[in-house]
Image: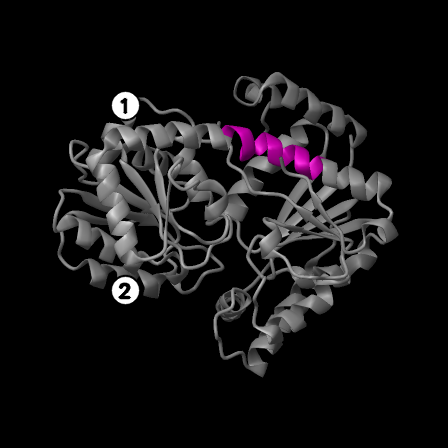
Amino acid sequence: MSFNINDYKQIAGSNEIEEIKLVAGRLEGVRMHNVNSTPSGGGVAEILARLIPLLRGIGIDATWDVIRGSEDFYQVTKAFHNALHGEKINLTDSMFEIFEHYTNLNLDLFDKEADCYLIHDPQPVGLIRKRSVSPASKWIWRCHIDVSRPDESIWGFISEDIEKYDATVFTMPEFSRPIPVPQFLVTPSIDPLADKNKELNGKTVMQVAEKYDLNPERPIITQVSRFDRLKDPIGVIKSYKLVKKRMDCQLVLAGGGAQDDPESCGVLDEIREAAGDDPDIKILELPPFSDIEINALQRASAIILQKSVREGFGLTVTEALWKGVPVIGSAVGGIKAQVINGVTGYLIYSIEGCAHRIEELLRDPEKGKTMGRNGKELVRSRFLITRHLKNYLLLMLALLKTLNRDLFERQIFMLSA
């Protein structure tokens, strides 16, 4: 699959596209290899699925691999993920042994030669030990999660590998930690031309609503996310139930799991129990690549929620704002960079606060529409894939062409606008 960068001119502007072409011209033929832990499910895989063809279309030899692992490995990496977010997890010696076993397995399988390696998140962090495959190449660890207050035992374990990289990339300044490796900041993005974000006609939106037994004449409140306790789906249901006592509405919890998240089935059972027999709560376990359905559900909604306990960037927020829908989200992670309180939606701190803001927007739909328009322009200016693409090109240019490590040591470079 390939995409034409010129297709984005009408949305991102001609100047942005010409800048991308200019930088890409300095990197033509450069080999860039990405590695993450899952081919689908979650924002990292979605971004890579769109970025790789775009990079190829402008002359970068971009490739993407997924590491191997079995159920026990993903159980361990999920525990590590939660511990890196600051949860109190009982980390055992056997967990570290399992992680090392699969790291060594993937090292044995790894033979990709590239000029620049972009290794995403903690699961494949140990691949840096394979540096001998291409000694002159540059290695980047791209961390999509908040590691500012991790369990120190897990941080100490993975930082031994992190410190071997040439550079690290974080989503926000507050997500990072002091490390003796140059740090860059790049926010994630959405592709406005992807099925999940492209314009849909009203008929398609209506058909999807009817497919899931939703009444578009009644307000729909939606949260789209993986079935993960950190997304607080139970808190979403509690907020909805407070609103439902006073106002008519429907709730949609739409999501699914991912290969590297073994907890999702248990979380889904908890959600169903909390929902009970309320016919106005729709729990939709969507298969991978249900992009048109998610697009239509977001467009059919009066309000989008993202009531996360902890959050990386929160691309579901970006998607909703791009569709002109106001977002009510917890004041955590990247949600705070997108939900400008009172402008593109509301930041909330509690179940009761969430319910209050839902009622406020349901009583004043015009306010919601204004917030939606503001949100769309915010995404256009900051969070489109064209900006993301340019950031990665500039990063590779810095590392491959001009990087002086002594000058960059312990520095943070803001690449994103």
Q: Please give the residue where the numbered disc 1 appears in the rendered image.
A: 202
Q: Percent position (x, y) of residue 320?
A: 39, 37
- Classify 108 as above or below 195: below
Q: Is residue 197 visible?
A: no
Q: Is residue 411 visible?
A: yes
Residue positioned 72% across, 62% down in the render: 179
| Residue 387 included in the magenta stretch of the image | yes
What's the CA distance linking mark 1 and mark 2?
A: 34 Å
Residue positioned 19% across, 38% down in the render: 214
Q: Please give the residue where the numbered disc 2 appears in the rendered image.
A: 270
The residue type indicated by label 1 comes to: Gly
Q: Percent position (x, y) of residue 139?
A: 75, 52
Q: Nearer the viewer, residue 416 or 75?
A: 416
Q: Nearer the viewer, residue 403 or 132?
A: 403
The residue type indicated by label 2 comes to: Glu
Residue furthest front in the image: 342
The residues colored magenta run: 380-393
Horizontal side, residue 368 vs residue 113: left or right: left
- Classify 79 as above or below 46: below
Q: Secondary structure at mark 1?
A: helix
Residue furthest bottom in the image: 93
Dominant SS of magenta comes to helix
